[in-house]
Image (cartoon, rainbow, N blue to C red):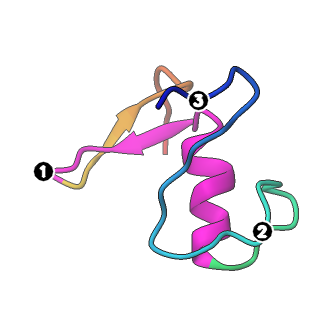
């Protein structure tokens, strides 16, 4: 069954309270609002667990 153009289908380990990252306080809400819907400045390599570029192409610490 195909989803309508105005339908968001999201699978999570729990029900997010909100998709607004400004008010997200629980883990599932934070993941659903900031990690899935929006690009992040950086991500982590899933194997090495080291930072990799996303929106930020480089950075200095």
Q: Nearer the viewer, mark 3 or mark 1?
A: 3
Q: Tell me if mark 3 has few (under 14), some (14-19) or many (20+) residues whose alpha carbon lies within 10 angstroms of its own.
A: few
Query: What's drawn in magenta, residue-wise?
Result: 27-48
Percent x, y of residue 19: 76, 55
CB contact under 8 Å: marks 3 and 1: no
Return the residue at label 2: 24
First in residue order: circle 3 vs circle 1? 3
Instruction: Give the residue at x 45% y 72%.
Output: 13
Q: Is residue 58 above or below residue 60?
A: above
Q: Secondary structure at mark 1?
A: loop
The answer to whether 20 appears left or right of 30 in the picture is right
- CA gap, disc 2 and disc 1: 27 Å
Q: Tell me if mark 2 has few (under 14), some (14-19) or many (20+) residues whose alpha carbon lies within 10 angstroms of its own.
A: some
Q: Nearer the viewer, residue 25 or 6?
A: 6
Q: Nearer the viewer, residue 60 or 36?
A: 36
CB contact under 8 Å: marks 2 and 1: no
Q: Tell me if mark 1 has few (under 14), some (14-19) or many (20+) residues whose alpha carbon lies within 10 angstroms of its own.
A: few
Disc on res. 47: 1
Instruction: Give the residue at x 49% y 45%.
Output: 61
The residue furthest right is: 23
Q: Quadrant of residue 24?
A: bottom right
Q: Nearer the viewer, residue 42 or 61?
A: 42
Q: Secondary structure at mark 3?
A: loop
Disc on res. 3: 3
Instruction: Give the residue at x 57% y 43%.
Output: 9
- CA gap, disc 2 and disc 3: 26 Å
Disc on res. 1: none
Instruction: Give the residue at x 48% y 56%.
Output: 11
Q: Is residue 20 above or below residue 58?
A: below
The residue furthest left is: 47
Percent x, y of residue 59: 50, 32
The magenta stretch spans residue 30:
yes
């Amino acid at each position: 069954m195909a989803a309508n153009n105005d339908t968001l289908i999201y699978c999570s380990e729990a029900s997010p309270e909100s998709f607004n990252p400004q008010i997200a306080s629980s883990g599932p809400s934070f993941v659903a609002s900031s990690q899935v819907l929006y690009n992040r400045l950086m991500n982590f390599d899933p194997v090495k667990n080291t930072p990799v570029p996303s929106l930020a192409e480089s950075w200095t610490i």
